[in-house]
Image: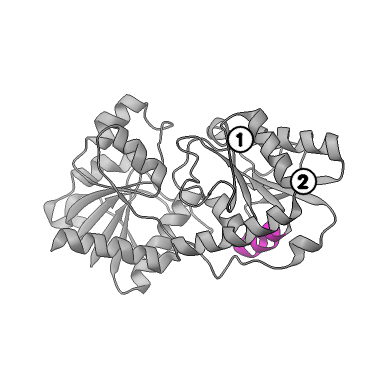
Amino acid sequence: MIILFDLRNVGLGNNGGSLTLIKSGNTLQKMGHEVYFLDSGQNKHTWEKLECERIIAKNNNEIPSADFIIATGYKSVAKTVSSPGRCGHKAHWIRGWETWQFPPKKIVSYILKAPTIKLVNSMGLKNKLKLYNFKSEIIRPGYDLDELTPNRKRNKKHKFTIGGLYTRGKHEKIKRPEWIFESYNYLKKKYGSIELWMFGNDDVCGGLVDNYFHRPTMETKQYMYNQIDVWLSPAIQEGLHMPPAEAMMTGCPVVGVDAELSGTHDYLLDGIDGIVSKNDLTSFMKNVEKIYLNHELRKDMGIRARQKVEEIGDREFNMQKLIDYFMGIIT
């Protein structure tokens, strides 16, 4: 099958969304499919090598014929829709509710009403589209299950360690790192010997953090997640939130929230592999305290956390789901 990932007006940068697309394209190509990335500028992503051919098409004649062309971001939808019919069926892989690009009314008018096959990466986004009476198919990217694994160091440490994602700028209000700082300060004042470890894209972390990792490699993440006793995920506007699932792959339980787009509904089950708090700071901090006070609960949840992410599957398993879905459309 020939597949075009349309990144025109979107591009590739050092962020989780670009990483997901590159790994998805590389996986599909390794599976024997012909994959191209349509772009309109420089590839600014340095974390992962793109194995697929990248094409900067000056006009429609330079776009290869294909079975499917997939819009990868809200700003690429118009380009995808206007591409020649020989580019195949037109789809949009919706991986976030991008209000930083368009307000909700324009998302409905320009994105949801566009004549594309709607793919989403999570239950939260599927339910969001359903509210506007749009059908969608869940296609998750899958996980690097062999790169992030549990070890026994977590249960041998002396200091309880909280982990979380540090963000500043336009996404700060939706990822809410201040909830992590508030939870850390609450526990530290009450119980003393506690550490906070975080990672992020910013060069410097501006909060009270004991250990900060700037754009960690997968090897560094393997070390980091295995040192953390509980990962905090207070985000409220995600598709399929990556860091909590990565932590769970190492056997680290998660405390998340019941927000509509928390990004954790696909894998975080309350009382089973972590805790789903009410979308309220006081409730969130109390649940962090609950998991802090119960070592055996954390241990049991951590085992089930890894099992739950394994159920979702690796990248090849999930990309095969994409191919199977596309084959159903073609035939």
Please report contact status of discs 2 and 1: CB closer than 8 Å, yes or no. Answer: no
Q: Main secondary structure of the magenta part?
A: helix
Image quadrant for the C terminus? bottom left
Above or below — where is 279 with respect to 11? above
Label 2, label 1: how far apart the Cα atoms are: 30 Å
- Pick whichever, 65 or 17, lies toward us: 17
Above or below: residue 86 compared with residue 180: below
Q: Residue at x 28, y 36 (%)?
A: 111
Q: Which residues are drawn in magenta?
A: 217-226
Expressed as whole percent of the image width and height from the top left, the position of residue 82 reads: 18, 43
- The image's mark for residue 293 is 2
Q: Would you say residue 11 sits in the magenta stretch? A: no
Q: Amino acid at mark 2?
A: Leu
Regarding mark 1 in the picture, which secondary structure is present there?
A: loop
Q: Using residue 183 as the reference point, say whether residue 22 is left or right of it.
A: left
Visible residue check, residue 197: no
Which residue is pictured at 44% across the width and 44% down the height? Answer: 239
When the figure is inspected, residue 306 is found, relative to residue 74, above or below; the finding is below
Which residue: 38% across, 41% down?
125
List the single residue furthest toward the right.
192
Sequence-first disc among 2 and 1: 1
Spot occupied by residue 314 in the image (x, y as percentages of width and height): 45, 66
- Let me know if residue 175 appears in the view: yes
Query: Looking at the picture, how far across and down is residue 255, in whole percent?
Result: 62, 44
* Callout 1 amino acid: Arg
* Residue nearest the observer in this picture, 287 or 176: 287
- Inspect the magenta stretch and tell me whether residue 224 lies in it: yes
Q: Residues within 10 Å of mark 1 (few under 14, many from 20)?
A: some
Residue 14 screen position, x and y as percent: 52, 50
Image quadrant of residue 285?
Answer: top right
Q: Which mark is residue 168?
A: 1
SS at mark 2 in the image: loop
